[in-house]
Image (cartoon, rainbow, N blue to C red):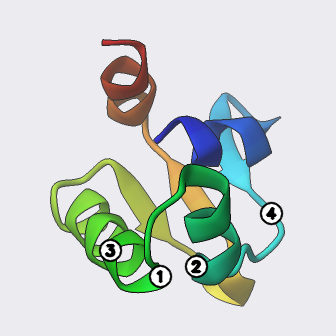
Amino acid sequence: AQVLLEFAESDAGNYVVKDRIARQDIAKMVGASREMVSRVMKALETEGYIESMPEGRLLLHERLRLLASS
């Protein structure tokens, strides 16, 4: 969650990751496998923390910020 927030930019009151980030790159940053990152990202999307947008962008909901700060 924290890595996604580090890449996010504020856009009309929302936080958006505008550039596509490879799962492998996230895995290297957090010391996990690409497969684990993919599973966690899918869970975050399923549970409503993030939302995939066109062109590989990610919308980060406020719930993700709360999760990262806890």
- Crowding near the residue tagged with mark 4, few <14, some 14–19, many ≥20 C-alpha atoms within 10 Å: some
Name the disc covering residue 23, or none: 2
Mark 1 against mark 2, which lies toward the viewer?
1
Mark 4 against mark 3, which lies toward the viewer?
3
User: Could you say which is closer to the camera, residue 37 or residue 14?
Assistant: 37
Mark 2 against mark 4, which lies toward the viewer?
2
- Quick one: label 2 or label 4, which is nearer the N terminus? 4
Q: Mark 3 points at which residue?
A: 36
Which residue does the image show at 32% across and 30% down from the upper left?
63
- Quick one: label 2 or label 3, which is nearer the N terminus? 2
Residue kind at label 2, given as amino acid type? Arg
- Quick one: label 4 or label 3, which is nearer the N terminus? 4
Q: Where is residue 42 in the image (x, y as percent from the top left)?
A: 28, 74
Indicate the secondary structure of the residue bearing disc 4: loop
Name the disc covering residue 55, or none: none
C-beta proximity under 8 Å, tags 3 and 1? yes
